[in-house]
Image (cartoon, grey):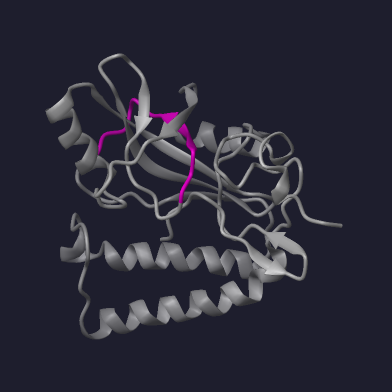
Amino acid sequence: MYQPGYAVFITVGSMKHFDRPVTPAEVSTDLHELISQLAPDSEVVYVEVVPLEGALIDHCFQLVDKYVEMHGGQVVVGWSLWELPTLFLEAEFHCVWRNPEGRLLDISPKKSVTAKILFLKDGLRIYDGRQVNNVRRVLHPDPMLLKYLETFDTEFDLLNRGDLVGQHGEIHLLGSEANQYHAIQSERAKLYLRLLGLFPKVGPYHPCPCGSGRKVKWCHKEFINAT
């Protein structure tokens, strides 16, 4: 799946639209329900993103484990929480580094720049070397949106089937599996184009696209749409 984080915009005339989840600016009722589903009574905190230069994307557990061996501190397991305003919420199984002074830092690089993540600690979860699918909560039950999100579940199932379980990095598919993968990507691309009209315009009370964990009005007001 795409890496959640800093929002890239689709420009339609003078309007700017979100096209991917960003760091939530508050724990809404729907987000609280998602948190309760994952790790009730666990702490939710904003964690600064300080990515290690040259490190691989989407390898947080291997990265933080190695960093702890070299620099001390602890691995803290939990979930990165993301929001595509008005459409869906998303939780990504993740870990961060607690440095020897006790400060939490997200040292894992992102595909797009983001200042902070909203992190849900989960002391009951352990990483066993297997991938964990993202958990999503739909806010706008549009049939096309549901089909679009289903493509990520289908892709996850395909890439974690049989001997592929536990594999990391670049995965090479052959034959029918390669055909299935390309069919998933094609279907997702078609649905994405059809969904453009649903993507919300950036408003003053939306989470800021910079990933600060603040609302646009009190962060980067230049992202607000002209009216």
Left or right position of 127 against 218: left
| Residue extending furthest toward the right | 227
* Residue found at x 62% / y 31%: 27
Q: Quadrant of residue 192?
A: bottom right
173 left or right of 90 in image: left
Give the extent of the magenta segment.
Answer: 113-127
From what the image shows, is residue 63 above or below residue 141? above
Q: Quadrant of the C terminus?
A: bottom right
For residue 75, above or below residue 179: above
- Residue depicted at 49% across the width and 21% down the height: 41
Residue 216: x and y in percent read 69, 41
Residue found 28% across the figure and 41% down from its top: 52
Q: Does residue 188 belong to the magenta stretch?
A: no
Q: Position of residue 180 (x, y in %)?
A: 34, 80
> Residue 108: percent from the left, percent from the top?
32, 42
Relative vertical location of residue 188 with respect to residue 66 in this rendering, above or below: below
Q: Quadrant of the N terminus?
A: bottom left
Along the line of sight, the residue nearer the viewer: 142 or 227: 227
> Quarter-wise, where is residue 17 in the image?
bottom right
**In the image, farthest residue toward the front:** 222
Prevailing secondary structure of the magenta residues: loop
Q: Residue furthest left?
A: 69
